[in-house]
Amino acid sequence: MLEKQSLVGLIASERKLSFKYIEIAKFNKSETELETLYDKWLYVLKNLPKLDKRPKALKERIFTKLFE
């Protein structure tokens, strides 16, 4: 039987590290076109310097801290 520490190491070593690249400059949706959380995060990342207040499309709780 494997000890807990050995089992954690075994599981961690089986995982692979991967990267996903996002070209934010090519994201061209307007505020009214945002549908998914993914869309909304890309919108925030691209437009954060321009945002003075919280847009209505970003009503989810996760965006609250950004606009406090």
Image (cartoon, rainbow, N blue to C red):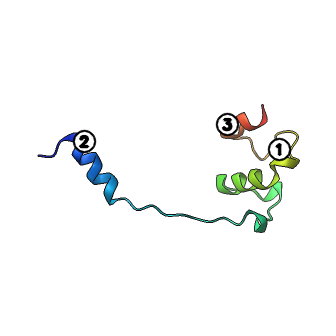
Residue 26 position in % (x across, y down)? 77, 68
Q: Quadrant of residue 23?
A: bottom right
Distance in Å between CA atoms under marks 2 and 3: 36 Å
Instruction: Name which residue lies at 34% across and 52% down.
Output: 12
Residue to which mark 1 is pinned: 55
Residue to which mark 3 is pinned: 61
Residue type at mark 3: give it.
Arg
Q: Secondary structure at mark 1?
A: loop
Discs 2, 3 touching: Cβ within 8 Å? no
Residue 32 position in % (x across, y down)? 82, 55
| Comes first in the chain, label 3 or label 1 | 1
Discs 2, 1 touching: Cβ within 8 Å? no
Distance in Å between CA atoms under marks 3 and 1: 13 Å
Residue type at mark 1: give it.
Pro
| Comes first in the chain, label 2 or label 3 | 2
Question: In the rendered image of this protein, does residue 35 appear above or below residue 53?
Answer: below
Instruction: Name which residue lies at 74% across and 38% down.
Output: 66
Distance in Å between CA atoms under marks 2 and 1: 46 Å
Q: Residue 42 has which mark? A: none
Work out which residue is located at the far top of the displayed protein and give it: 68
Give the foreground label among 2 and 1. Answer: 2
The answer to which of 60 and 50 lies nearer the viewer is: 50
Instruction: Name which residue lies at 22% across and 40% down.
Output: 4
Task: Give left or right: position of 56 versus 4.
Answer: right
Task: Give left or right: position of 1 versus 21.
Answer: left
| Comes first in the chain, label 2 or label 1 | 2
Q: Residue 5 has which mark? A: 2
Q: Residues within 10 Å of mark 2 (few under 14, many from 20)?
A: few
Residue type at mark 2: give it.
Gln
Quadrant that contains the C terminus = top right
The answer to which of 6 and 62 lies nearer the viewer is: 6
